[in-house]
Amino acid sequence: MGSHRPSCTILLRATIVLCCVLSAPAWAAAADAADRPDRTLSPYFFIEGGDSGVDAFPLEATDVVANISGVIADVSVKQTYKNGGKLPLNARYVFPASTRAAVHGMQITVGDRRVVAQIKEKEQAAREFDAAKREGKTASLLEQARPNVFTMSVANVLPNDRVVVELRYSELLIPEEGTYEFVYPTVVGPRYSTTPASSGETWIESPYLRKGRLPPTTFTMRTNVSTGVPLADLGSPSHALKIDWEGPTVAHAVLTPDGGFGGNRDFVLRYRLTGKQIQSGVLLHHGPKEDLFLLMVQPPAKVAPADIPPREYIFVLDVSGSMRGFPLDTAKRVMRDLLGGLRPSDSFNVVLFSGASRLYAPRSVAASPSEIQRALDVIDHESGGGGTELEAALSTAVGIPRHEQSSRTVVVVTDGFIAEERGAFDLIAKNLHDTNVFAFGIGTSVNRHLIEGVARAGMGEPFVVLGPDEAPAAAARFRRYIEAPVLTNIQVAYQGIDAHDVEPASQPDLFAERPIVVFGKLRGHASGRIVVTGRTATGTFRQAFDLAGIAPRPEHAALPQLWARTRIARLSDFAAEDPEAAREVTSLGLTYSLLTRYTSFVAVLEQVRARPGAGVDVKQVLPLPAGVEDSAIGEYSSGAEPELWLLLALGAVVIVLAHQRRRERASC
C-alpha cells in the first residue's frame, strides 16, 4: 500500500500550490487594504492580472449640469477618471440616462489636450478604440447597451492621470396633470438574465458593491430652470436641494452637502407653473438642410362619464429577488391601493412572477371586498426570490380567458431589472392590441426603458413609485387616468403647410391630463396652421395654431435630435431584429450625430502615452440602488468576500486530504 504515498504527496503538494495561487490575489489585496483602509474588498469588480497596484476605483467624480429652458432640457455630464495606482488603466463604467435622452456629443480631455468625439457605426468605433488601446493611446468609447443604459470605456489612463470625459444630451419634458418632471438616473440596477451575456451584453455582468456600501466617488448635480412663466412648487422628492431664485421665472438648484451620497438613486426634479398652466404651442427650428416643428397641445379638462362600462384588471406583480425588501414592500402598498379602488362591477386577477408565474385564479374574479382581501393575503405572504421572467408572466396574462362585455387592462408592477426587454415589447405589441397596458416602476432606480416601453407598446401610461409614501398618490392617479379618456379620435391636420415624417404618425386615445406631442418636418415656408381635433366626454375638441410669425429660438436647436430620438425609440421598441429597422436607426444616428444601438462615439488622443498592451482592464464597481437588497445580485454576490470563499475552499481541501492520508496510513 506504500505505493500510494508518492501520488498522495504529489496531489497534496499540487493542491496546496493551486490554493496558494488562487488565494494570492486575495491575500495581496488584503495586505494592500491594511495600508488603505478605504479600499473595498468586494468581489464585484474584475481586475485582469489581480495586481494589487491597480486602483479599483478609477471614476473619481460625476458632475451634472442640467439647463432647462421651456420644455427642453440640455444636460452636460462630466466624468473624471483618476488613476491612483501604479499601472496604466483601461476603465469601463456602466451608467444610466433618461429614456428620452438624445445623446449628441462627447469629448475627452487629458491635461490641456481636448479631443471631440466622432459618431461612427458601432463596430467601426469599437475597432478604432481597440486599436488605440493596443497602441498605448488614451481613448474613450461611449456605447449604448439600452436606450437608458450606456457604457463608457477609457483606455490607457496613466498613473496620476486625470481624464475628463464629457457628454451632452437633450430631452423633452412633457408635463402630466400640470407637473413637469426632470429625471436624471444615477445608477443602473442589476439585471436578471437567463442566458450568459453575449459580446454586446457584457454590461449585465457589471460588478456591484454590497448593500449600504458606497464607492469613493463624488456626485454633484446643478439644475438651472428658466421657463418664461412664473414657477411654483419647485422641489425634489429624491434629494435635498438648495434653491436660489434669480426671479419668479428662473431658479438654480444644487444638492445640499447634508443629503448624503446622491449617486445611488434617481435624481427627480418636479415643478409646476403658476395657475397650473401647460405651455401649448409650436416650436420651430430652421436648419441648413431641413426645418422641424414641435407641437404641444394642452388637453381639455377630464370629465368622467356617468356610466362607466365594466372593466377587467390583470395585475402582473414582480416578486423576484431584486424586489426583496423595500421594493416589494412598496409594491404591496401599491397593490393594496389599486385593488382597494376597484368597483363591484369590475373583475380582477393577479399574476405573481419571478422565475415562474402563478395565477391567483384560473379566471378573473369579481372585485368583492372578500375576494380582494384574499388576494391581498396571498400577496402579503410573498418575500421575494428568484429571477425576473416578465415575458412568461405576460404570456400567462394573455392566456387568461376574457370576460365578455368588459374592457381589459393589464397593470405590470416591477422594478424592471431584467435584460430581455425586447421580448416583452414584442409580446405586448402582437398579443395585447385590444388591451391597454399600464406599468408601475417600483424603486429608487427603476429600469425606465422597460417601464416606458411596456406602456408604449400597450397604449397605456407609465408610473414610477420611488417609495411607499408615494404609493397612495400613484394609485389614485392611476384611477383618475382610467376613469374615462380625456380625448379620443384625435386627428392632426396641416393646412397650408407641407408636413412630413411626423412622429407619432397617429395619436392614441389620451387618458392622462398631459399634452398631445407631435414632431415633424416642414417643406417650404411655415406660413400655414396646424389644427387638432378630437372627441371629449361632452362634445368636440378643436384647437388651431398659426405658424406665421413664430420665430425660431436658440434653445430650439435640439429639435432635430429630439425628432430623431423619437423615431429611433419607436423603431427600437418594436422592430426586434428587423434588418431594415436596424439600417434606419443606424442612418439616423449618423445623420443626427446620435448615440444609438448601432452607433457609438469614439475619441482618440493621437499620442502614444503607454507601452503597447501595458494597460490593465478594470470594471468600475457600482453601488446598489438605494433600497435594493443584496439578493438582486445573486447568491455569490450577496455579501461574502472572495477571500472568505477561497479560505473556506482551502480549508475544505485540507480536511479532505488529511482524511485521505489517515485512511492510507490505516490501510498500510
Image (cartoon, rainbow, N blue to C red):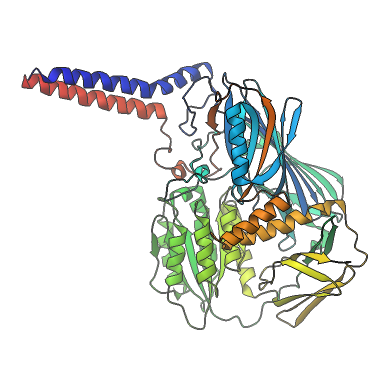
Q: Position of residue 426 (x, y in %)?
A: 52, 64
Residue lying at the far right in this picture: please name it. 549
Q: Residue at x 55, y 69 (%)?
A: 341
- Is residue 395 shown above or below 333? below
Which is nearer the eye, 226 or 191? Answer: 191
Foreground residue among 384 and 138: 138
Residue sitting at 32 percent across and 23 percent down?
Answer: 19
> Quick check: 131 above or below 491?
above
Q: Is residue 365 above or below residue 179?
A: below
Q: Quadrant of the N terminus?
A: top left
Location of residue 347 in the rendering, given as x and y in whole percent from the top left corner: 48, 75
Q: Position of residue 635 (x, y in %)?
A: 39, 41
Relative height, residue 352 to residue 270 (above, below): below
Give the image quarter of residue 611: top right
Task: Answer left or right for 612 relative to 220.
Answer: left
541 sits to left or right of 364? right
Q: Is residue 452 visible?
A: no
- Relative to 480, 313 lies left or right: left
Q: Is residue 13 visible?
A: yes
